[in-house]
C-alpha cells in the first residue's frame, strides 16, 4: 500500500529512499537521504548481514540532527549494504565498488565510513565516483580515529560544561568507560590539560586509582591488544564497577544504554560527556537532570568525527579540523546548556530543539526542502 511506503514521512523527511540491487554482484543495499536543506548529506555506509530500511532511516535522521546541531552545511543521510563485513577482501571491494556506481547520480549523498566499512572502502568509493569522506591520508583524508577527533571534541564540551559550573579541567578527576578510539583520546586530551584519569574500563574489566592512572602507559598497553586489566597500575575491578567511581567528569565511550534507571543512582559525578551514541536512556537522563548532574548529549559532544569529515570534504587540513571542532563544539555546548537552564528542559531536549530549529530555518530558505 502507498501509505506503507511513506510510513517514515514527517515534517523533516526522508527526501528519498533508494533500494539498490545489482544482480551480477548480488549487491543489496538501501540509501536513505533524509533531509538536504542544510546541504548535501553526509552519513556512513554500514555493512552488516541484518540491516533494514528502518535502521537506515533512523540513522539517516540521526545524521540530519547531528549535522545540523554541529552547524555543518550538510544534511543527513545513511546507507546500508547487506553482507558480512569479514567477507574475502576482493569480494568486499567488488561489492563496495558496485555500491558506489549505483549511487553515482545521488549527488545529495556523500558516503563515509561506519560499522563494517573503513578508509579503504571510502577510497574505492572515491575512485569510482569522486565523492566520499573518511579517506586515507594518501588521498587527502584526515584519519579521524588516529588523530582522536571525537575525543578532542569531548574535551571542548567538558571544558565549557565545567566552566559553566565554575570549575575547570585542571585537577578534575575523569572516568572513562570504553578505552577505544573515542575514550582513549578523550583521556589523553583531558590529561594534557591537567585532568586526572582515576578510572577506565574496556570490554574485559576496569581499573581505578584515586592518585591517577598514566594515560600514555595504558595507551601503549592497549596498542598491544592487551586489556586494561593486564596493567599493573591501580586496582582491578569488575567491568561495570566503573559506574561507581567518584569523579568530576564521567565519559561513556563504549556501548548504548549503559546508564539506565536501575543504575543511574550509582554515578558519583558532576558532569557526563557522552562519547558513545545513546549511552544513557531517556528516563535516566531525566533523573540526572532532576539531580542537577549535567549531561552533554551524544550528538553535541561526540560530533568531532563528523565535523572532521566535513572539513576534509571541504579540502581543509588536520589543523583546521581541530580548530573547527573546538569552535563548534564549544559554541553548541554553551547554547544547549543555556537553553536547558532557561527552558527547564534536559540538555537532550534542548539539543533536539536547536537542531530541529536549524533544519526548519534552512528549509524555509529553500524552494524545495
Ligand atoms: P572502539 O571499538 O575503538 O572502542 C570501544 C571500546 O569500548 C573498546 O576499548 C572496548 O573494549 C570497549 N567496550 C566494549 N564494550 C564495553 C563495555 N560493556 N564496557 C566497557 N568497555 C567496553 O570504538 P570507538 O570508535 O571508540 O566508539 C565508541 C563509541 O563511540 C561507539 O558507541 C561509537 O558509535 C561512538 N562514536 C564513535 C565516534 C568515532 O569517531 N569513532 C564518533 C561518534 C560516536
Image: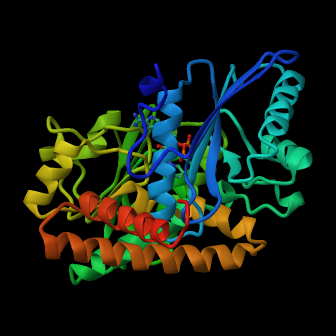
Residue drawn at (42%, 36%) of the image: 8
Q: Quadrant of residue 160?
A: bottom left
Residue in front for this viewpoint, 314 or 251? 314
Relative to 109, residue 241 above or below: above
Relative to 95, residue 216 above or below: below
Q: Where does residue 29 sit, x and y in percent of width and height?
A: 68, 27
Q: Where does residue 66 sit, x and y in percent of width and height?
A: 47, 58
Relative to 62, residue 367 above or below: below
Q: Where does residue 337 sit, x and y in percent of width and height?
A: 26, 72
Residue drawn at (75%, 75%) of the image: 317
Residue in front for this viewpoint, 294 or 64? 64
Q: Is residue 146 visible?
A: yes
Q: Quadrant of residue 27?
A: top right
Q: How many marks are shown on the rendered structure?
A: 0
Residue drawn at (48%, 69%) of the image: 362
Residue in front for this viewpoint, 229 or 152? 152
Q: Where does residue 213 sit, x and y in percent of width and height?
A: 43, 58
Residue drawn at (15%, 76%) of the image: 342
Relative to 304, residue 175 above or below: above
Q: Is residue 171 visible?
A: no
Query: What sort of colour scheme is used for the picture?
Result: rainbow
Direction from residue 210 to residue 305 in the image, left or right: right
Amino acid at each position: 500500500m502507498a501509505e506503507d511506503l511513506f510510513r517514515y514521512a514527517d515534517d523533516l523527511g526522508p527526501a528519498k529512499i533508494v533500494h539498490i540491487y545489482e544482480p551480477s554482484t548480488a549487491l543489496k543495499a538501501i540509501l536513505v537521504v533524509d533531509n538536504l536543506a542544510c546541504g548535501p548529506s553526509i552519513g556512513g555506509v554500514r555493512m552488516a548481514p541484518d540491516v533494514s530500511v528502518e535502521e537506515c532511516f533512523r540513522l539517516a535522521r540521526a545524521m540530519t540532527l547531528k549535522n545540523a546541531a554541529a552547524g555543518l552545511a550538510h544534511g543527513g543521510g545513511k546507507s546500508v549494504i547487506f553482507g558480512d563485513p569479514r567477507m574475502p577482501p576482493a569480494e568486499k571491494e567488488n561489492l563496495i565498488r558496485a555500491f558506489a556506481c549505483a549511487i553515482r547520480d545521488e549527488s545529495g549523498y556523500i558516503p563515509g565510513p561506519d560499522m563494517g566499512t573503513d578508509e579503504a572502502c571510502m577510497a574505492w568509493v572515491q575512485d569510482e565516483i569522486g565523492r566520499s569522506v573518511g579517506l586515507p591520508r594518501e588521498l587527502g583524508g584526515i584519519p579521524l580515529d588516529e588523530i582522536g577527533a571525537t575525543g578532542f571534541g569531548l574535551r571542548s564540551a567538558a571544558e565549557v560544561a565545567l566552566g559553566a559550573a565554575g570549575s575547570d579541567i585542571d585537577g578534575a578527576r575523569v572516568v572513562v568507560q570504553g578505552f577505544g578510539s573515542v575514550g582513549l583520546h578523550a583521556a589523553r586530551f583531558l590529561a594534557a590539560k591537567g585532568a586526572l584519569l582515576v578510572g577506565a574500563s574496556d570490554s574485559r574489566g576496569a581499573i581505578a586509582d584515586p592518585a591517577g592512572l598514566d594515560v600514555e602507559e595504558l595507551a601503549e598497553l592497549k596498542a598491544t591488544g592487551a586489556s586494561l586489566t593486564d596493567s599493573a597500575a591501580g586496582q582491578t575491578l569488575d567491568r561495570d564497577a566503573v559506574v561507581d567511581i567518584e569523579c568530576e567528569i564521567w565519559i561513556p565511550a563504549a556501548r548504548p544504554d549503559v546508564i539506565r534507571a536501575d543504575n543511574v543512582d550509582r554515578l558519583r559525578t558532576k558532569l557526563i560527556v557522552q562519547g558513545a551514541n545513546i549511552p544513557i536512556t531517556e528516563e535516566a537522563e531525566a533523573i540526572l537532570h532532576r539531580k542537577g548532574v549535567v549531561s552533554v548529549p551524544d550528538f553535541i559532544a561526540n560530533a568531532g568525527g563528523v565535523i572532521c569529515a566535513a572539513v576534509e570534504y571541504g579540502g581543509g587540513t588536520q589543523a583546521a579540523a581541530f580548530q573547527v571542532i573546538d569552535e563548534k563544539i564549544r559554541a553548541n555546548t554553551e547554547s544547549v546548556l543555556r537553553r536547558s537552564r532557561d527552558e527547564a528542559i534536559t540538555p537532550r531536549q534542548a539539543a533536539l530543539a536547536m537542531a530541529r530549529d536549524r533544519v526548519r530555518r534552512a528549509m524555509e530558505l529553500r524552494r524545495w526542502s
